[in-house]
Image (cartoon, rainbow, N blue to C red):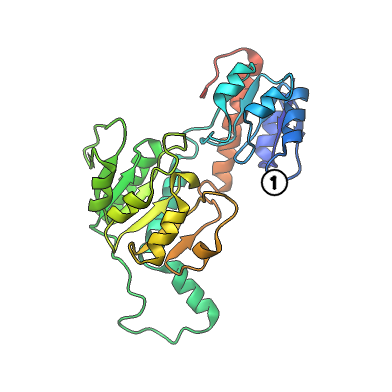
Amino acid sequence: MRLFVSRPLPDAVIAAARAEFDVTVRASNAPMTPDEMIAALSGFDVVLPTLGDRFQAPIFDACVPRARLLANFGVGFNHIDVGAARAAGLQVTNTPGAVTDATADIALTLMLMSARRAAEGERLVRSGRWEGWHPTQMLGLHLTGKTLGIVGMGRIGQAIARRAHFGFDMRILYHTRSPRDLPHAQPVDSLIRLMEQSDMVVIAVPASAQTHHLIGAAELAAMQPHAHLINIARGDIVDEAALIAALQAGRIAGAGLDVYEFEPRVPDALRALDCVTLLPHLGTAALEVRTQMGLMAVANAVAFRRGAPLPNPV
């Protein structure tokens, strides 16, 4: 069986794949072009795509796929039209679990960086303009004991809640379609009320048609002026233009972003704001995590090859 891997992956992942498949690894780190996607579907039994490889309905309509599985590298699969894939005869899998702790760690990183103005301070030191410590320099938000609002309470949301509650003694509120029995977290049935009550808001819902621009002007207007917004989910969950307007007007104190609405494009207006911490989608960027993700994607492909139940179907 032939396996196409859309980006270079850690050596251990490629070795595991080669043990089971005839593997072709695409050398580029750029998203696949439409022609590349059509060729991969037409010439391989399994395709292992990732974020940015937009397998949408026109791609499936443009070929007669030989492939019968898209073994996605990553938990998020909003770049794949799952319905169109199934209609074309393909199954789709992803890699949940492997990303949970690393993504939660990045959420806490951004919470601390945004609250304590760490990116702004680092730029000040690098610029050579820092004139030394003084009592009122770069005063930020003290995170301990504050209220954290989490939008979404799946694996990643729960991991963030544990870190914030047990590590920083934060009060945890959350908004989700399916409230959970969590002794250290309280559900809030209205997203607006969650935004109103929180000193820090973290977005941790999957991207879908239902969550597109879930956080818009009205939700941002409900936040307190000292509050910060953190997004480690997907960029288009937040209306980026509305966020920029809220930050420019000082309606919220800051934001920490690991994802962007039109990634990798980041608007000049966002980059110009000192009150925003910007990371280049580092959520799972640790070798052991990316290796675990890759091995999980390969395990899905191997199960398919052997006719076994897929471990992580979507």
Residue 114 is situated, as x and y percent measured from the top left of the image, at: 39, 62
Residue 275 is situated, as x and y percent measured from the top left of the image, at: 42, 67
- Structural crowding at the residue carrying mark 1, measured as other residues with C-alpha within 10 Å and reported as few (<14), some (14–19) or many (≥20): few
Would you identify the image quadrant in which residue 23 lies? top right
Q: Quadrant of the N terminus?
A: top right
Count the labels in the image.
1
At horizontal 36% and vertical 46% (from top left) the residue drawn is 160
**At label 1, which amino acid type do we have?**
Ala
Foreground residue, 103 or 229? 229
At horizontal 41% and vertical 61% (from top left) the residue drawn is 245
Residue at the far bottom: name it. Answer: 131
Would you identify the image quadrant in which residue 300 lies? top right
Residue 39 shown left or right of residue 243 in the figure: right
Where is 230 relative to 308, above or below?
below
Foreground residue, 305 or 231? 231
Residue located beneath label 1 in the image = 30
Where is 301 relative to 95, above or below?
above
Foreground residue, 157 or 298? 157
Residue 161 shown left or right of residue 47 in the figure: left
Residue 220 is situated, as x and y percent measured from the top left of the image, at: 34, 54
Residue 176 is situated, as x and y percent measured from the top left of the image, at: 31, 36
Where is 245 relative to 10, above or below?
below
Secondary element at image label 1: loop
| Residue 18 shows in this picture | no
Where is 153 relative to 88, above or below?
below
